[in-house]
Image (tube, rainbow, N blue to C red):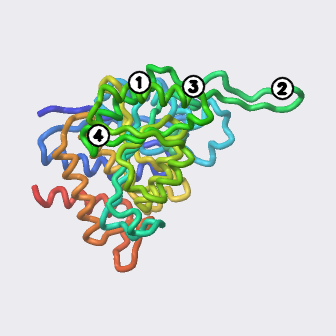
């Protein structure tokens, strides 16, 4: 039996509650499909800072590098908000993405038929929406230098640098075109080329790469317009390809099409075997220990792990179907509650989804 090593980084806040449920479901799937998952826990974020005075200890990083995949909960808590930027929990997330060279962030925003009515948007606008946002994850203004806060002309001055090498644009563009080939073969590349030089280069390189993928239709859109179009008519999008900061913003916006941040998973991939899977939501420290957060985003991140790291498409589908059956059967966590449905806690939702997987064993 093949054994895969998974670095399990629960992180802060409700991170442990949601990863516990994903582990529960993944274990059920591994039993069913006869493979072994060996979960190795380690600290990341604020909890790591408390113990080691750094949010990303060397030992955690080494474990993540050596693992076949990383499953992450979330990092951050208000109590670390006053820490210097260099040791804030978020720094660990950026650090691990950079160190593992996870340049390709896949954030699917699909609307479940069972949940169309919980979206704050009109049902007919969001129904059947199925978008894959591909966000560049290791460049852009997130990592650009020079950066800092200093005193200039007698006043404080803060600055960051939005920048991309053409090689960085090229490799994420290739990822997007390959993903698009397996979907509806449409990419909308989002930039701000009417204003930013870095975006003009982005557009030039993406267009150049598109010549190698004749079957994929490429369009370009300015980010402000894209933000509007996502709400006006989300069904026009198949794959959205964009840079780090625009992708950060648009993916939070897109989550509202599905109705809750608690539903959206993500995969962060590299050119090598290194890969990390995490919900797109944060650590929700106010909900910690209450057994109320939605574990579905993390459970679906576990499904993406099987698909993208181990090529297990059937097991991936099995988890997605188990989640959908739980929703169809009327089970809901607080964030997605609707009239006539049954509210379940975090661990109960995990149990129900696990039960659905075992059902057709
Ligand atoms: C995300 C988050 C992170 C980001 C934060 C927590 C650093 O918002 O994964 O979208 O900005 O990338
Ligand atoms: Mg974000």
Element assignment for label 3: loop
Q: Residue at x 67, y 33 (%)?
A: 84
Residue 354: tell me if it is visible.
Answer: yes
Q: Residue at x 63, y 46 (%)?
A: 79
Residue 106 spot, x, y in % from top left: 38, 40
Residue where numbered disc 1 is placed: 170
Closer to the camera: disc 4 or disc 3?
A: 3
Residue where numbered disc 2 is placed: 152
> How far apart are labels 4 and 2 at the CA level?
47 Å
Q: Tell me if the residue at label 3 has its CB under 8 Å from ligand 1.
A: no
Closer to the camera: disc 2 or disc 1?
A: 1
Compare marks 1 and 3 and give the one earlier in the sequence. Answer: 3
Q: Residues within 10 Å of mark 4 (few under 14, many from 20)?
A: many
Residue where numbered disc 4 is placed: 305
Element assignment for label 1: helix
Element assignment for label 2: strand
Nearer-the-camera pick, 241 or 144:
241
Element assignment for label 4: helix
Compare marks 4 and 1 and give the one earlier in the sequence. Answer: 1
Q: Residue at x 61, y 32 (%)?
A: 196
Residue 9: tell me if it is visible.
Answer: no
Q: Tell whether 20 sits left or right of 198.
A: left
Residue where numbered disc 3 is placed: 163
Q: Is residue 59 above or below residue 112?
A: above
Residue 118 spot, x, y in % from top left: 42, 68
- For the C terminus, which image quadrant? bottom left
> How far apart are labels 2 and 1 at the CA level?
36 Å
Q: Residue at x 30, y 72 (%)?
A: 330
């Amino acid at each position: 039996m093949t054994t895969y090593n998974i670095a399990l980084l629960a992180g802060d806040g409700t991170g442990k509650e949601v990863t516990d449920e994903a582990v529960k479901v993944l274990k059920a799937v591994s039993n069913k499909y006869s493979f072994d998952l060996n979960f190795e826990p380690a600290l990341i974020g604020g909890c790591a800072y408390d113990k080691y005075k750094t949010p990303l200890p060397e030992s955690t990083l080494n474990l993540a590098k050596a693992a076949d995949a990383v499953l992450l909960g979330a990092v951050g808590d208000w109590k670390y908000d006053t820490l210097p930027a260099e040791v804030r929990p978020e720094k660990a997330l950026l650090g691990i993405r950079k160190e593992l060279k996870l340049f390709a962030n896949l954030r699917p925003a699909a609307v479940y038929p069972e949940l169309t009515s919980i979206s704050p948007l009109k049902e007919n606008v969001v129904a059947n929406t199925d978008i894959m946002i591909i966000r560049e994850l290791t460049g852009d203004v997130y990592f650009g230098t020079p950066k800092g806060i200093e005193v200039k002309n007698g006043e404080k001055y803060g600055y960051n640098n939005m920048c991309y090498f053409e090689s960085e644009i090229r490799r994420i563009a290739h990822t997007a075109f390959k993903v698009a080939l397996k979907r509806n073969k449409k990419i909308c590349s989002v930039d701000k080329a009417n204003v930013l030089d870095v975006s003009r280069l982005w557009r030039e390189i993406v267009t150049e790469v598109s010549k190698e993928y004749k079957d994929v239709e490429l369009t370009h859109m300015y980010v402000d317009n894209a933000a509007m179009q996502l709400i006006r008519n989300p069904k026009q999008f198949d794959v959205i390809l964009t840079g780090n900061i625009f992708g950060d913003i648009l993916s939070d916006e897109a989550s509202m099409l599905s109705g809750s941040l608690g539903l959206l998973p993500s995969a962060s991939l590299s050119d090598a075997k290194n890969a990390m899977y995490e919900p797109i939501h944060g650590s929700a420290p106010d909900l910690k220990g209450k057994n109320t957060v939605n574990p579905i985003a993390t459970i679906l991140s576990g499904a993406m792990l099987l698909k993208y790291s181990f090529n297990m498409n059937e097991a991936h589908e099995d988890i997605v179907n188990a989640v959908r059956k739980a929703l169809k059967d009327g089970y809901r966590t607080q964030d997605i509650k609707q009239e006539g449905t049954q509210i379940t806690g975090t661990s109960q939702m995990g149990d129900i989804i696990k039960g659905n997987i075992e059902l057709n064993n």
